[in-house]
Each structure stands twice: as C-alpha cells, then as structure tokens.
Amino acid sequence: MTDGPFLIPVLGDQLDPDLAALRHIDKAHSIVLMMEVADETTYVRHHKAKIAFILSAMRHHADRLRALGWTVDYVALDDPANSGSFSGEVARAIDRHKPAAIHVTEAGEWRVRAMLESWELRFDLPVTIHEDDRFLCTHAEFDSWAAARKQLRMEFFYRDMRRKTGLLLTEDGQPEGGQWNYDADNRKPPPARDLLMPRPIRFQPDAVTQDVLAMVATRFADHIGSLDHFQFAVTHEEAMRQQRHFLDEALSRFGDYQDAMLTGEPFLWHSILSPYINAGLLDPLALCRAVEQRYRAGKVPLNAAEGFIRQIIGWREYVRGIYWHEGPDYAQRNALRATRALPGFYWTGDTDMHCLSQAIGQTIDHAYAHHIQRLMITGNFALLAGVDPHQVHIWYLEVYADAYEWVELPNTLGMSQFADGGLLGSKPYASSGAYINRMSNYCGSCRYDVKQRVGRDACPFNALYWDFLARNQRKLASNPRMALPYRNWDKMLEDDRTAIREQAARFLDSLD
C-alpha cells in the first residue's frame, strides 16, 4: 500500500456531489475519476439522445465538482488513449496517480457490480464499495421485507415507505384523506386539447453539449433516435428549473391525467424528471417533500400529490428492490414462453397502427414516453403478440433516457410482459383496443376500427387480446383477476372464437 491519494471513480448515473463515496473523503488527498467509455455506450445500442444527455451531464458535473474543490481526472470518449472500459480506465488512472486505495459507490446494475467487485484482486489495492444511500430502502431492508411475505406486492411496500418518510401522513400516523392510494382517481381520459397545457422547458445546448451532440451524431449515427429535438437539462441547476416548472405548472393536473394520451402531445402534465432523478441530478426524497408541501399549502389536490409520490418512493424503490433481490438471472425469465422477434417498426415507428406510431415516434424523437404509453401501447402490443421478453427488455433499455437496468428490467419483464409469472404484477397488463380508445384520442386518427374484432379494418389489438388469452389459458385461467375475461371468452360462439384466432394468426404472420 502506498501513501498516495484515494481514487474515487464516479459513474454516469452518480452525478450527485453528496455521493456516498465522496461524503467522508478528504478532498485534498483524493482524485475523482470520471470516465466516458465505449463499453457503456454500446453494450446495448442506446438512443443517441440518451448517450448525449448522459455524457453532457457528466461533463457538466465534473465542472461542478471542480468548483466544489475536488480534483477531477476526466477521460473523454474521444480521447485516443481511452481503453473503452471502466476497468481499463481505472487501471490507467492507477498508473497515473499511484493511489493508496479506491473508494466507489455501488453500481446500479449487476453487470457493473461484478466489475467493481473484481477490482481489489485485479489491482492489488484496497477497494471500499459504499452503499448507495440515495435510495430510501437498503438491500438488506428489502430482503427482510420480502422474506416476511408470500407475495411481494408494491402497495404494502409503499405503505412502509410512507411510514418511514412520514410523507402525506397525519399527526397520528394515518394516511392523509383516510386512504393510502388514490389511483382510482387518476384514470381520467384525456381532455379536449388544452391550449394552456404546460410544456417542459427546452434547454438550449451550451458549448459543452454542442460538442457532445456533434460527437454522438458522428460516432453513433447508426443508433436509434434523433438529436434534432434534444432539450434535456444537463446540470443540477437546469434540472431544478424543470422541477420547479412541474410543481408550478403541471402537478395540479398530473393526478387526473397521468394515464391519458393525446396525438401530438408527448408530455401532457408529466414531470419529465425521471432522467434527472435516475442520473443523480435531482434528490428524489427532496422532490417528494416539495410535492407534499404544495399539497399542504392547498396548491395541488391530494390525488396528484399522492400519485406522484407513490411513483417515486413506492414504485421506483420497489422495482429496485425486486431487481437486486431476484438476482442477475431475473433477466432471462420467460413464464409465458414468448419467442416472437420484436417487430421492425419498433425502431422506425413505421406502422399504420396510430397508437404505436405515436408512442414509438415520440420515443425516437425525444427518448421519452410516459408510463402508460410504455405499458399499454408498446408493452401491451409486445405482450399480446408473444414477443420474446428479453428482446422487449433490451429495446426499452436502449430507447429511453431514464432507462437503467435496475429500474427498466423489472418494469419490462415483470409488469409489462408478465415474464416473471406474477412475482411483480398480480395479472398481465393485457388489453384490447377498448382501453386505448378510452384513455386516448389515438383511435380517432387510426385507419383501423377499434370497434371491430375481425375483418380488414379491425383493430389488431382486439383479436390479439383474445388470442393471447386463448393461447395462454392453461397458465392464466386460474388467476382470480383473469376470471372475468375468460368467462367472456367461454361465452363466445365457437365460430366467433375461431374467426378471432384466425384474424390474429393472419396479423401475426404479417409481422413475420
């Protein structure tokens, strides 16, 4: 062991100056290592705008750390000496700085965790891996919670997180309004187009971001996505501006319309904050307390405040817990034995199904779609069509700016594709075109008729829905939450069931 400095690698989703590995280390005797590496941009083929956002945010964060007094060794992607991997860059940094030890905050993915755990033996240096305390629930706490339950339902975990934080609780520890969950009030169909609908702030790229955009456009020209609409915040200050904008302009109606979808309106009343939370630019608990404060000041209704807080301290924390609890093999689960290849239009948006064209088109443009577009449009279609869930997982990981495996994988395999057999969700999130018609205005602009099950103009979701139930009946019919749709299927005339399944078969053949 030398008397050299501490080396502190900071990863691209750890853009927080209060990071665990930084908090108790002497700045004067430490060097922060930040690395843009090819492995992390291409282990899946990430959306161009996602790559640009992360790299620009990293470069700006390095400047923030320097302003706070840290020495930062920054390796750019286009550095000719760049080895292309985290371990390779740590090795080069060790040669440059001769550190006494390495301190790092735990990685968010199994793949990178294994890499960090190999460093002590590989480099013959002490390596301290600090737990990532930007989350409310530790791995040990989640494992303890899970061990005491037969079913790992988010609702009960969420209530524990409410109690732990005190968010939206009365003085005697009861939920505000007498209910824990106001989801039933958050399912309103879209209103008529509102000329006063809020728009997220468009952040104009500065010189740093322009350099990144130019590099990404050249180096990743064959990746999905457009850079023409790039508008992400890339600093903590910009992310805070978008947070305040959401709280002031959109939160009050977020609850009512969080599930709604409108043609040509990708953002509606959503916060557009998840990329910044997941990258470390925003503090999720501080955001939730700001939402609670707006409710207590009478500025937003309870269903809006509760609905938003549930997504952060409930669902976000819960899926992270599931990811680490279930282990790296979770990604390979395929309970429904789905094997179809993901259709090519997922990379182009070129389909005459208007709902899919809208959801995929905005994904290509903005690296963004809100949760119902992901769950009930792109996810629902893949589920009904029997697409290989691992391919669906890789696509979601590639295309969304907020997608890191710990948050994306359980959402995709568990909630969207039911590939874990019901560990995460109590039933498959499968629906016909009726749900899409109820929660959007998409069907009015589609060449297909959402009211028809069979025929040339029938909405493909309708036949696919019933075909999905039929081919998975042995696996799903015993699920109590599927009893009603199976009763309705059994009540149909045999000729009608045959026609529906033939309609679905023709459509699925056309995908191949």
Image (cartoon, rainbow, N blue to C red):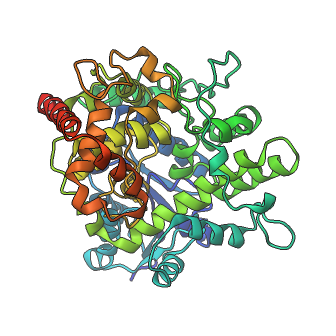
* Horizontal side of residue 184 vs 442, given as left or right: right
Where does residue 482 sit, x and y in percent of width and height? Answer: 38, 56
Q: How many marks?
A: 0
Residue 17 visible in the shown view: no
Locate residue 247: give its quadrant: top right
In the rendered image of this protein, does residue 425 appear above or below residue 224? below
In the image shown, does 1 or 59 lie closer to the viewer?
59
- How far across and down, in percent of the image, does residue 195 sit? 68, 15
Q: Is residue 263 left or right of residue 388?
A: right
Residue 424 lies left or right of residue 413; in this view the side is right
Residue appearing at x 46%, y 64% in the figure: 320
Residue 314: % across, % down: 58, 61
User: Does the image show residue 417?
Assistant: yes
Tell me the residue at 32%/33% (across/down). 461
User: Which residue occupies 59% across, 39% down?
Assistant: 258
Residue sitting nearer the eye, 83 or 387 = 387
Is 100 on the left-hand or right-hand side of 340?
right
State the residue at coordinates (65%, 68%): 159
The quarter of the picture where the C terminus appears is top left
Q: From the viewer's perspective, is residue 204 above or below residue 256?
A: above
Q: The N terminus is located in which quarter?
A: bottom left
Q: Where is residue 251 shown, x and y percent of the image? A: 71, 39
34 or 217: which is nearer to us? 217
**Residue 252 in the image: above or below residue 30:** above
Quadrant of residue 452 within the rendered picture: top left
